[in-house]
Each structure stands twice: as C-alpha cells, then as structure tokens.
Image: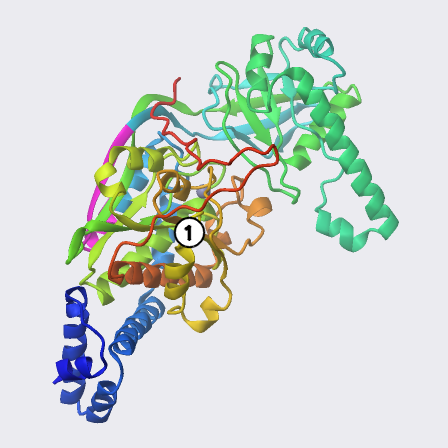
C-alpha cells in the first residue's frame, strides 16, 4: 500500500533509501495501532521526500527531548574538570583523563580505546609557592610554569631585578653580565591593572585617549627591546639561565584583573614562575626604585621520565556502512594553569553528551560514529595529525568531521573550510536545527582551509571535509584561554547543552546522507604578492617532546 503511494508520487525509491522507507512504514503502522489513523492517512498523501523529512524531524525532536530531560553534562564536567583537573601532555592526569574517556564511552555502548602515537616528557605539577621575603613578607600569587625545573625543597631565594628596555643587542649582552645569582622579571609591567572596558567607562574621554596612546607606546617600546634579545618570552629564560640567573618570573596579563596566561618553560635548570599582574607590579616597582626586593620561589614538580601519548578513540559501528565515518572531534589535553574547563573540557563533554543522546534515540546509526578526543593539541595539533597520518583507511571514508574547541559558548558560526560544495549539505542539514538555534548560526561558504588553530585543520589539510563549530566568546580570549581562571564555574551549561543538541543532530544527518559528500576544493585566491595560494599542508604530528 505504501509502495503505491511512493510510486504515485513519482519518486524513485532507491535501495539506499529502502530502510528509511521501511522505518516510516513501521512508524505509520504503529501510529495506526495507537488509533492515530487520521495522522497515518494524512501521511500517505505526503511525498516521499517530505515523509523522509518528517522522519528526520521526529528524530530531531527526540534528540532535543533527551538532551533536556537527562543531561549528564554537569556530571561529566565535575568528573573531568574538578576531579581529574588539568591535562598537560605526558602528565599522569592526562592519562587519567584518557582512561576516564574510554570508561565513559564503553559504558555508553561504544567501543573505546586509547591509541598510542608517540611519547612525551612526563612532568607532574606540585605545589607552587612564591613569597616576597624583603622588604616585607608577602605571599604572592604565583605558579610554576609547566615543564619548569623544580626547585630545591626549600626553594630558591634571591634578589629580584627587572629587565630594562634595551636599545641594541650589545646593550642586552652587557646587561646579561649583571644578572648572576638574581631572579629576573621578564614581562612588561603594564601601565594600569584595570581593564580597557573599565577605562572606557570611567575615564574622561581625554583621559581614555591619553591612556590608549601611552599603552600603545609602551607596547611598541617593549617589543623593540625584546627584538634585541633575540628571544621570545618563552625562550628568554634559557638565555638568562646561561648567564647565571637563578630564577625567572614572567607575567602574562590578559587585561583583566587577576587573570594571567600560564604556558610552559623552556629553561633547563632554573625555575620559571608566572606571577599575577598585581604582585608582579609590586616587585617591579620595588626593583625600579632600588629597594632590591627578595623573593623565594618554591616549586615541587616531579620529573617522571617519558610517557606514551594517546588519542582516545570511541566508535559506534555503522549498521549499514560501517566503513564510512562521521567524526566528532574535541581535544582532551589542556594547559595546566587552571583546569582546562573551556579549553577544552566543554568540547569533550559536548561530544560525550551528543553520543549519549544518539545512543538512546538513534541506535541504528547507518555510518560509524567515531569520536576523537585528541592528545597534545596544545603543542601543535599533534594527536589529531597523528590520527590522520596513521589511518588512511579511515581518512578516505570520512563523511565529515565536527570539531569544537573555542569555549563554552553556543555555536554561532560554521565556515565551509574551503570545500566547494559545503554550502549545499551543511545548509541543508542546518535546516533541521531548532529554529532558535538555527537563526543564530552564521555560515560562511566556501570559507578557507585552516592552517592550524584547532584539530579540524589536521583533517582539512588532507582534503577531508572538517569543520570548526565556533562559539560565542564569553570573553574566551581574556578570561579563560590558557589562563589561571579556566575553571568549572566558567562553564555555561545551557549553552553546552545547546551544542550537544546541534552536534547530535548534525551527526545524525551526516550518518543518514545517502552518499559521501563532495570533497571538491575551491580554487584558492592569488595572494598579495601575485602568487597562487596553495592548499595548506603545514601540519605534521610531533611524536616526541625532544627533551
Ligand atoms: Zn583548545
């Protein structure tokens, strides 16, 4: 009977679509049994394509309902962000995080594994203590940088000097001779510890303008001076170590009070610490005034040799096309100045929640759903690049990759990554999102292929349709990105829930799409020097830390 309807609509029913058709058939039967004859009959009048659409809409509403009724996001976040905490490459906590991911995906009925791809120096953070010991005692807000050498048990105590502005390389070289036995402040001490927004709101227009001018001039002079050192803020500590300094203090203010970025140290022997702007300024002014302040640095990290690096991979085999893949991508590692809540625990729990929802409402996934929770994104997209390099058999059969990695905000931008036909399928799939989600999403097609930034680039570079799902900012750059404040309390759960729904819907639709989508690339533009831009191929996995 239903077959007749299909023919009456004049739409050829391909074998690929047979299952959808059968599902609808069964669904309508079930409705009839529930006494919904009129709805069943009304459906008969619809064309096949609208019946398919209706089926998809039902699935979408089941996804939304499950996300709202049974969200596990807060539980996942507590376990990952609060209990495991920061996830620095090579650290024991990173290993715990990998094991946690695998345990959860297995519990959801996926097949999960930790897949080794290399090794890295294993460094475990301990406590950090920074104390000003002269001219008065004060505990300072300070943190040992990742991979910084530990100090002796009692710490290292010395006079603090501030690095001056240099006017030449020889100027820098002669200053190096003065720092033996000293702890050196290597960051610029900003003119004001107030945020720009605060200045704009409260200063007179003239006062604000003056502040901007002074701020820009200070930065220009600092950058010129740094250029004479031949180093960056990351490599400078090693030069100071070689000149006899006993410790280094940096400050990497994000322009909001109390918030500072905490990266890694490249020194070999001496400790490198970050001190928050407010305490840093205190030391800086004292040093400049000739007070000769003294500080004790104590950092009791552990060196644990090397450990293997992994990607956590979860797969739910496709029931019709097990060798074709829809990939959910979010890096698991983080910097360790805080607990990596928005970079990128939110991405990880979004994917986990999307899988939880899909397992419940879409157990008959046609294609294989593969989740990649990558290692070592922060050192250069290493885990995801290694995965693409190691799995050509998967890479050639990937439908699409959805990557999320820019904070807790709701997804509002999707670009086409330079794939010519991306507008066609992504726009079509976006139509199924709940209206209030869809209306906020700006698309840019065909977009440009990424050269880095996050893990979708590892796939795009190999010509695989991979897309970054970009979020609203929530002041990501100044509040949480690689800072000492990227903590659980910054997660906005309603927005993460929205993202889990979006990912689940887009994954479902990519699984259902009759064929693999086009991989046709755009012709890239001519650059400003008149040269043809070529598709990026700069990414390559780094499989050892090299020290
Ligand atoms: Zn990230």
Q: Is residue 81 visible?
A: yes
Q: Is residue 293 visible?
A: no
Query: Where does ligand 1 appear, by image quarter?
Result: top left
> For residue 259, which quarter of the picture?
top right
| Quadrant of the image containing the N terminus | bottom left
State the SS at label 1: loop
> For residue 142, which quarter of the picture?
top right
Residue 82 belongs to magenta span: no
Q: Residue at 46% across / 20% down in the picture?
A: 150
In the displayed structure image, the side of residue 316 where residue 482 appears, left or right: right
In the displayed structure image, the side of residue 407 where residue 505 appears, left or right: left
Q: Nearest the camera: 98 or 410?
A: 410
Is the residue 231 above or below the residue 104 in the image? above
The residue segment tinted magenta is 102-117
Residue 113 belongs to magenta span: yes
Q: Nearest the camera: 343 or 60?
A: 60
Q: Nearest the camera: 52 or 32?
A: 52
Is the residue 254 above or below the residue 201 in the image? above
Q: Residues within 10 Å of mark 1 (few under 14, many from 20)?
A: some
Q: Nearest the camera: 398 or 541?
A: 398
- Disc 1: which residue: 420
In the displayed structure image, the side of residue 234 where residue 501 appears, left or right: left
* Residue 248 in picture, x, y percent from top left: 59, 20
* Residue 288 in picture, x, y percent from top left: 77, 22
Q: Residue at 39% across / 60% down in the picture?
A: 424
| Quadrant of the image containing the C terminus | top left
Tell whether circle 1 marks a residue whose Cβ is less than 8 angstroms from ligand 1: no
Is the residue 470 above or below the residue 174 in the image? below
* Residue 341 in picture, x, y percent from top left: 45, 47
Q: Residue furthest left?
A: 1
């Amino acid at each position: 009977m239903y077959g007749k309807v299909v023919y009456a609509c004049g739409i050829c029913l391909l074998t690929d679509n047979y299952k959808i058709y059968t599902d609808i058939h069964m669904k309508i039967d079930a409705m009839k049994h529930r006494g919904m004859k009129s709805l069943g009959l009304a459906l008969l009048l619809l064309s096949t394509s609208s019946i398919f659409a209706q089926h998809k809409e039902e699935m979408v509403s089941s996804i939304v309902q499950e996300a709202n009724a049974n969200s596990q996001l807060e539980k996942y976040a507590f376990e990952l962000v609060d209990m495991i905490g920061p996830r620095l490459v090579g650290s024991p906590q990173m290993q715990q995080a990998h094991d946690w991911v695998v345990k959860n995906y297995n519990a959801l009925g996926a097949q999960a594994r930790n897949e080794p791809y290399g090794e890295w120096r294993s460094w475990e953070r301990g406590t950090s203590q920074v104390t000003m010991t002269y001219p008065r005692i004060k505990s300072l807000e300070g943190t040992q940088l990742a991979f910084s050498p530990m100090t002796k048990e009692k710490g290292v105590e010395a006079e603090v000097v501030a690095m001056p502005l240099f006017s030449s390389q020889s100027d820098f070289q002669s200053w190096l001779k003065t720092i033996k036995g000293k702890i050196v402040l290597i960051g610029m001490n900003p003119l004001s510890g107030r945020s720009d927004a605060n200045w704009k709101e409260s200063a007179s227009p003239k006062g604000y303008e003056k502040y901007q001018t002074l701020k820009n001039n200070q930065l220009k002079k600092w950058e010129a001076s740094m250029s004479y050192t031949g180093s960056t803020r990351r490599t400078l500590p090693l030069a100071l170590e070689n000149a006899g300094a006993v410790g280094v203090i940096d400050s990497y203010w994000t322009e909001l009070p109390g918030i500072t970025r905490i990266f890694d140290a490249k020194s070999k022997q001496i400790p490198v610490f970050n001190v928050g702007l407010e305490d840093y300024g205190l030391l800086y002014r004292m040093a400049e005034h000739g007070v000769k302040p003294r500080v004790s640095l104590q950092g009791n990290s552990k060196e644990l040799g090397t450990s293997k690096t992994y990607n956590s991979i979860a797969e739910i085999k496709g029931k019709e096309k097990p060798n074709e893949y829809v990939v959910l991508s979010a890096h698991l590692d983080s910097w360790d100045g805080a607990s990596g809540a928005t970079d990128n625990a939110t991405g990880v729990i979004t994917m986990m929640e999307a899988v939880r929802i899909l397992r419940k409402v879409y157990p008959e996934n046609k294609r294989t759903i593969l989740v990649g929770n990558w290692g070592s994104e922060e050192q250069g997209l290493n885990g995801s690049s290694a995965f693409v390099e190691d799995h050509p058999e998967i890479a050639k059969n990937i439908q699409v990759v959805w990557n999320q990695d820019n904070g807790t905000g709701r997804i509002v931008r999707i670009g086409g990554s330079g794939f010519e036909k991306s507008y066609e399928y992504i726009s079509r799939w976006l139509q199924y999102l709940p209206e209030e989600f869809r209306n906020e999403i700006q698309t840019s097609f065909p977009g440009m292929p990424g050269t880095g930034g996050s893990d979708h680039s590892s796939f795009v570079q190999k010509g695989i349709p991979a897309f970054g799902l970009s979020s609203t900012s929530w002041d990501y750059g100044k509040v949480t990105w690689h800072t000492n404040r990227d903590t659980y309390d910054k997660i906005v759960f309603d927005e993460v829930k929205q993202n889990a729904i979006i990912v689940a819907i887009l994954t479902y639709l990519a699984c259902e799409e009759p064929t693999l989508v086009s991989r046709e690339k755009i012709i890239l533009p001519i650059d400003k020097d008149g040269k043809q831009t070529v598709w990026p191929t700069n990414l390559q996995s780094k499989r050892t830390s090299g020290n």
